[in-house]
């Protein structure tokens, strides 16, 4: 497995991976599949350096998933905090790519003076993501009860935090 910075040519596969979760799971609160144009705009928010990064894991030409750090909140005082996300191809969950990707992202953030704290939200239930965050040094800080409504029901989200 190789981990590298994502490039524009990766966006269609990243979209395919993400839209699986939109359409079939509660782990993201998007309700409709994301368009390629919207995902290209999203991708343009990342950089090769700085606190907003995106990395992919691959085996040969197959992208297994991605981990990213983006804007936590839009107000200027939040600029040194990032929100992390990780999505794996549905057949790659539990194979170690998630831990490797998250560790790589967090190592990169540790080198960024503009990054101070990382936050990750986990829609419950999601034992694999809870375990991943704990394995990567995050601590639980809050649970928002029934904060999202998808598939005809409400979902809780547990938030994690760690220094970078």
Image (tube, rainbow, N blue to C red):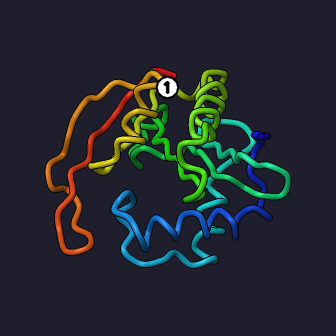
**What residue appears at the point 41 percent right and 41 percent down from the top-left corner?**
129
**What residue appears at the point 46 percent right and 25 percent down from the top-left corner?**
135
Q: How many marks?
A: 1
Residue 88 appears at what percent x and percent y?
A: 57, 52
Residue 87 appears at what percent x and percent y?
A: 54, 52
Q: Which quadrant of the rendered structure holds the N terminus?
A: top right
Nearer to me, 59 or 120: 59
**What residue appears at the point 15 percent right and 56 percent down from the top-left corner?**
146
Residue 51 appears at what percent x and percent y?
A: 60, 36
Nearer to me, 89 or 139: 89
Secondary structure of the residue carrying numbered label 1: loop
Mark 1 burial class by Cα count in 10 Å: few <14, some 14-19, many 20+ = some
Q: Is residue 92 above or below residue 49?
A: below
Q: In the image as oriented, which residue stretches furthest toward the left?
A: 145
Quadrant in which residue 9 is drawn: bottom right
Q: Is residue 154 left or right of residue 69?
A: left
Judging by the rendered image, the residue that carries numbered circle 1 is: 136
Quadrant in which residue 15 is drawn: bottom right
Q: In the image as oriented, which residue stretches furthest toward the right?
A: 60
Q: Is residue 95 above or below residue 89?
A: above
Residue 101 appears at what percent x and percent y?
A: 63, 38
Q: Is residue 31 left or right of residue 60?
A: left
**What residue appears at the point 78 percent right and 55 percent down from the top-left corner?**
7
């Amino acid at each position: 497995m190789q981990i590298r910075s994502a490039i524009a040519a990766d966006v269609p596969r990243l979209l395919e991976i993400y839209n699986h979760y939109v359409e079939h799971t509660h782990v993201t609160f998007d309700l409709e599949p994301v368009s390629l144009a919207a995902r290209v705009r999203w991708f343009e928010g990342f950089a090769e350096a700085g606190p907003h990064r995106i990395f992919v894991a691959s085996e040969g030409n197959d992208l297994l998933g991605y981990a990213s750090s983006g804007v936590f909140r839009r107000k200027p005082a939040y600029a040194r905090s990032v929100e992390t996300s990780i999505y794996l191809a549905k057949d790659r969950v539990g194979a170690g790519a998630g831990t490797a990707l998250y560790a790589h992202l967090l190592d990169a953030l540790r080198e960024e003076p503009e990054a101070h704290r990382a936050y990750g939200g986990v829609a419950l239930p999601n034992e694999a993501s809870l375990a991943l965050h704990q394995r990567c040094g995050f601590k639980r800080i809050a649970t928002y009860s029934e904060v999202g409504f998808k598939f005809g029901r409400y979902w809780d989200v547990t938030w994690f935090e760690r220094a970078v």
